[in-house]
Image (cartoon, rainbow, N blue to C red):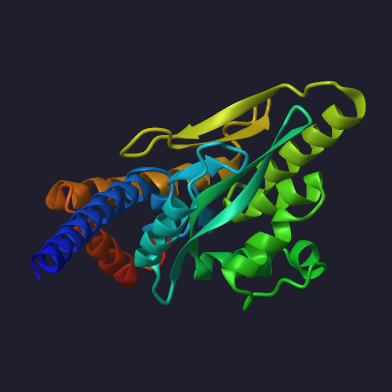
Amino acid sequence: MRAGFFILCVLLLHSHCFAQTDQLLEQKLVLRALDRGPIFTLLGDLKPMSTDIWQVPLDSPDLDLGMVDRVRRIMSVFNDERTYGDVITITHTLKNQQKRELQAVVFDRVALATTIKRHPDYFGKYGITESSHPLHVAVTIEHLPTLDRERGYGYLFGYPDHAVDFFCNARRKWTQTGEFVKRDFVTINTFGPNGIVWAVPKGKKTHPENQRFVARADQINDVYRELRKKCGDNHVKLLSSVREWKASNPKLDEK
């Protein structure tokens, strides 16, 4: 009897500790998403898809499938009619070497549908339509040849069309000739580290598409700083405030 009671106490304590650990991880991931580039998906509609929340190389000896499950469960806190969170596989190509990672990701369904509608020739040939589930879109693009994949991710990450064209053309030239195309970079800061950055042709940082993007990003950053100031590190309250603000201000660029 005493042994059974002891085991029950141990199990309850373990369960309590595990729940606390998950709560801390949830707070960490939610704040990371809101403080970094994904804010442009979660508060605005600049980026149909965002990462920079959590990642692990697929070939890592430290790959913990239990942790992957925990992160996937936590990412579901973002799920509502407009937003979808999950963990997916993303391939990066660096100097002809491919690096595959599991990455936590968030989607804005409306922004995603708008992007698909704006590029029917690209998405249509892969059977992707405005009603496609975000996972279907991401998985389809992930398994495309390198240049097509990178164009698809460029659209999903919300980069200006001229920047996506430049990057893909520069990648093609480098692959065919080994010649690196000189470029400039547009950088947008966020509340937290990293921000977002994309490549543009040399001397084209002031392209109208870049300026529109930066102006809208500045609006989003201003709004988020005020919400962050009011909510502090209370990630539940902060995420709720972000959702409420976005629901009542669906189009920042029209304000």
Q: Point out residue 210 in the picture as x, y percentages from the top left corner.
A: 56, 41
Q: Residue at x 72, y 46 (%)?
A: 150
Q: Residue furthest right?
A: 176
97, above or below 87, in the image: above
Q: Position of residue 146 (x, y in %)?
A: 79, 45
- Residue 35 in picture, x, y percent from top left: 32, 44
Instruction: Place residue 244 in its image quadrant.
Output: bottom left
Vertical placement of residue 83 versus 81, above or below: above
Front-lying residue, 112 or 255: 112
Q: Would residue 167 be found to the left or right of residue 45 on screen?
A: right
- Check the picture and name the quadrant holding the C terminus: bottom left
Identify which residue is drawn at 57% across, 56% down: 88
156 left or right of 220?
A: right
Is residue 172 rendered to the left or right of residue 209? right
81 above or below 217? below
Identify the image quadrant of residue 180: top right
Q: Position of residue 120 (x, y in %)?
A: 75, 68
Taking the image as drawn, is residue 200 in sight?
yes
Give whichever of 5, 149 is nearer the camera. Answer: 5
> Which residue is pictured at 74% across the width and 38% down the height?
166
